[in-house]
Image: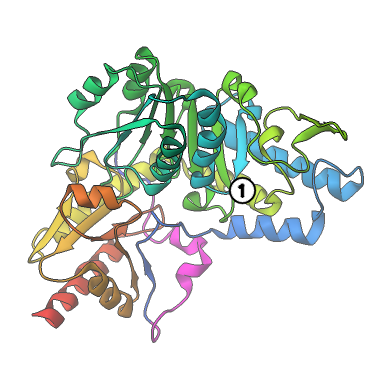
Amino acid sequence: MKSLIKDDEIARQFPILKEPIHQNKRLVYLDSAATAQKPLAVIQSMNAFYEHTNANIHRGIHALAEAATEAYEIARAKTAAFIGVSDARQIIFTRNTSESINLIAYTWGREYLKKGDLIVLTEMEHHSNLVPWYMLAEEKELSIEFVHVNDDGTLDMQHYHDLLQRKPKLVSFTHMSNVLGTINTAKEMTRDAHTAGAVVVIDGAQAVPHFSVDLTDLAPDFYAFSGHKMCSPTGIGVLYGKMDLLNAMPPFMGGGDMIKKVTFEGFSTNDVPYKFEAGTPAIAEGIGLGAAVDYLESIGMDAIFAHEKELTQYAFDVLADVKGLQIIGPSAGERGGVVSFTLEGIHPHDVAQILDSEGIAVRAGHHCAMPLHQRFNIPATTRASLYLYNTKADLDALRLGLDKVIDIFA
């Protein structure tokens, strides 16, 4: 599919991309896998909330409180529809993907996993989908195994099915790798894990912002993602869960709004999703998430994905003859818009610093995926990550910047 997004047409809708940087250089933002920039429509939605309807939600009966509550719950419904969920009660608002996965570990995991149970993860996971399970495994004496990653950055599916033969209680994996760009076969992996009797958790932080995700079709038990990677504000994340599991889970935190009744003898919990949303939430951020959903849908997720695929192929083409550069992960046609690479003899931090002097923002390091870098026997990579507002001119600038890097270290 050819991109329907015109160069610069989208970028003009993002105020920060108009800001000069480092002696009036044009900002070339290639770090959207870390966080995406925000379009004016999202910024305006939050300003409008603070200017016209700022109040706490779910508790007040005055006009502002009712307007704020309505806007917040409309955002929840928009988010549910965006990922193919018909019942908005299955959408729990958290701070980010990390909190969503921790919520699962601390509630479902603590309640239903027992000593000796097996958790299956993969070698390409972000720390957010590793550390909560490490912590739980230490507490509950659980076992963890990792699906191997092939040299081409894809999962070793034979190894995955071998591990499923051991009847894990939980399988958790990333929908798309934040380092390799690998898009995993989430539907098939979920189906096979369910056949083996496992509960399935999917980290969708790098998927939902970039291509259409239909949870009715994928059918995981839990699915987590972050708003800030999909043009919405920081501080708002999403956890989807199947209703029977959510109802059976204990609350995550105690406080206001997550209760029905509190007495001197104890308390009773509120209904889902409020059972898991203690205290005053990120109201403006939730409304901003709803605006981001509207914005992405106005462009079309298929168009966004096609645009990123076109740019990814272009990135491979313009970087092909850079001396000493090696891209890790699948071929351009088999990945999302993430290009992580090494440059022979030059540390990624040096690469990123010199590129920054040219106005080019990339990420350098292990990208919160240290075990994956260990798997490839490299300490770090430089990562250029793409989104709907990027253009071929951005990648031309990256290429020229890398030429300067090489010249400096020659």
Q: Is residue 184 above or below residue 33?
A: above
Quarter holding the N terminus is: top left
Could you say which quadrant of the image residue 272 lies in?
Answer: top right
Q: Position of residue 136 (x, y in %)?
A: 46, 37
Residue bounds of the magenta highlight: 5-24
Nearer-the-camera pick, 258 or 359: 258
Residue name at image x 32 percent, y 65 percent: 362
Farthest residue in the bottom direction? 23
* Residue that lies at the very extreme toward the top in this rendered image: 195
Examine the rendering and report whether any part of residue 373 can be seen.
Answer: yes
Image coords of residue 95 (percent x, y)? 58, 49
Tag 1 residue: 291
Mark 1 belongs to which amino acid? Ala
Name which residue lies at 45% across and 57% down: 35
Secondary structure of the magenta portion, mostly? loop
Picture quadrant where residue 244 is located: top right
Dot 1: what SS?
helix
In the picture shown, does residue 133 fall above or below 186? below
Question: How far across and down, in percent of the image, does residue 376 sit?
Answer: 16, 49
Residue 11 covered by magenta stretch: yes
319 relative to 207, above or below: below
- Please tell me in which quadrant of the rendered image residue 94 appears: top right
Where residue 49 appears, as percent x and y from the top left, is 74, 55
Q: Residues within 10 Å of mark 1 (few under 14, many from 20)?
A: many
Residue 9 located within the stretch drawn in magenta: yes
Decide if residue 212 is in sight here.
Answer: no
What residue do we see at 47% from left, 75% from top? Answer: 19
Q: Quadrant of the C terminus?
A: bottom left
Q: Does residue 135 sit above or below 344 in this rendering?
A: above
Is 186 on the left-hand or right-hand side of 72?
A: left
Q: How many marks?
A: 1
| Type of colouring | rainbow
